[in-house]
Amino acid sequence: MGNKKEKGESIEQENGKLGVDDLAMFCKRKGFVYASGEIYGGLAGFWDFGHLGVELKNNIKKEWWSFHVTKRDDVVGIDGAIITNPKVWEASGHVASFSDIIVMCKKCKKSNKIDKHEIGKVKCICGGEYDFEKAREFQSMLKTNVGIDGFAYLRPETAQLIFTNFKFVQENARMKLPFGIAQIGKAFRNEIAPRDFLFRMREFEQMEIEYFVNPKEKCPYAIGNSEIFVYSAEMQEKNKKMEKMKFKDAFKNGIIKTDWHAYWLEQEYLWFVGLGANKEKFRIRQHMRDEKSHYAYDTWDLEYEFPFGWKELQGMANRTDYDLKQHEKHSGKEMSIVIDEKGTKLIPHVVCEPSQGVERAFLVFMFDAYEYDKKRDNIVLHLHPKLAPYKVAVLPIVKVDEKLVEMAKEIYCDLRNEWNVLYDESGSIGRRYARNDEIGTPYCVAIDETSLKDKSITIRERDSTKQIRVKISDLKDVLRKLLNSEIKFEKAGKIVETRVK
Ligand code: ATP
């Protein structure tokens, strides 16, 4: 890593901008993400998560599950196997058509993946022409051996296990339409050109919901007033600019075809902004006619403006009853359910399938959190407290004072019963604050000589560097309220003069 730090810039940034490679460098330097097997040169498309990365990733998954499953009456979860009967992938259509088009650039000779509708229309990023005559299809599922002569696929998405378990879950959890089944888990795709750090990987995780409805029934949930940039298929075809509008109005004006789709698009956007993502960097983009999967009635992507352009963050297809019907046909097992007292049967429709890559969400939260603070001459990672790897750091001001260290360790042991807490006694207090700012710890607890006398400590807030004095007996309660954003920092204790920023 070359140190390109200029005055007023962080080690990673150039011209004040944080590119995806810069973020990768930062993630490696601090212990978030490493190239997998890096001591052997790594393997393209595979990444390992370090001691901070695993915490952030787990927190993302926990928050997703809490928002989409735990806090809803109408969604339950499953955890399907990565390897399943290959017939599942025949029925779903993946064996026949989960492939990419590969083209080679005549100039740089690199192979690239393009969408089917781009054949004959696009150029390589180096500016060279593609050799479209030699374009070929490439199966994207990875294969593995099972037993002595068997083979199977590593699942390319989690969704199909939801469909194959649909009847069991519906019956056992006694779900009535409308309802959803959620799943978080690994997926594998033999991407031709893995790139942009965690954006395009070969092994990644998905957080998915299949939401089943009776297509004749309306969405009972309100579509709220939040606004987003909307980029409909028509706007794209007519070369128009995207427009900011309310989700509600996009549905009323017929841009989003169903109320359910508008509802879920808004929910997914709200999940991101509720965890601190920058509102202005989101848009919803409708798939154009030649881009949509053959079975989809309507597909919208939630997109985010990455440093490398607007890209898909989450796909949301209206898959109708395609998948359940396919599995009914191929397995011979009935997939319809009884929907009323008269015994009417129906194969439910998947009105929306929010499908989010964990690592793409990881990138969004990191890009939006990273700030080089010129005053502090230090990176501050403004991660939402719910996502921050460590919630609190416990720092005894002087490490030579045994009594003070003992008190700090007692506080640390007590706090870690509830949160992931960092204990740090090395270096100046300023250096320790800076280290915690860089890894996104929202609060630092400093124990000083006065603490031994008055049994109180100082809490320092990452984002403002303000400090308050709080009694040790109140510490857990105050931290709980702060971490749940139930109280303003200034109101949580007595503000004290900030000696060390
Ligand atoms: P793309 O067009 O970017 O290849 P896709 O349309 O193939 O994505 P989906 O099949 O809709 O993606 O998958 C749902 C979600 O899973 C994506 O929105 C993304 O968040 C995540 N995802 C898909 N492929 C990858 C990948 N190779 N690496 C990381 N995340 C991925």
Image (tube, rainbow, N blue to C red):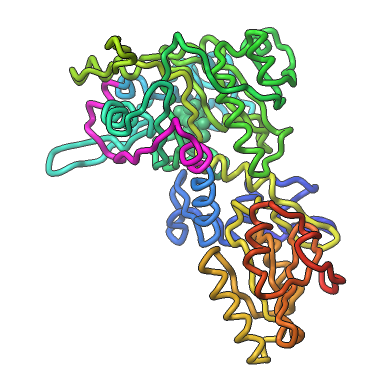
**Do we see residue 112 in this rendering?**
no
- Is 501 displayed left or right of 339 in the figure? right
Q: What is the quadrant of the N terminus in the image?
A: bottom right
Q: What is the quadrant of the C terminus in the image?
A: bottom right
**Residue at image coords 33%, 35%:** 155
Instruction: Tell me where residue 83 appears, x and y as whole percent.
Output: 27, 39
- Is 494 displayed left or right of 175 in the figure? right
**Residue at image coords 44%, 42%:** 204
Residue 373 in the image: above or below residue 471: above
Residue 479 in the image: above or below residue 228: below
> Which stretch is magenta?
64-91
Of 61 and 371, which appears nearest the observer?
61
Seen as rendered, the residue at the extreme left is 148
**Residue at image coords 67%, 70%:** 474
Quarter of the figure with residue 361: top right
Instruction: Tell me where residue 78 appears, x and y as whole percent.
Output: 35, 38
Is residue 62 one of those drawn in magenta? no
Of 263 and 368, which appears nearest the observer?
263
Is residue 81 one of those drawn in magenta? yes
Instruction: Tell me where residue 285 appears, x and y as whole percent.
Output: 62, 21
Residue 408 in the image: above or below residue 501: below
**Residue at image coords 47%, 12%:** 217
Residue 257 in the image: above or below residue 128: above
Of 43 and 484, which appears nearest the observer?
484
Quarter of the figure with residue 380: bottom right
Instruction: Tell me where residue 418 appears, x and y as whole percent.
Output: 53, 64
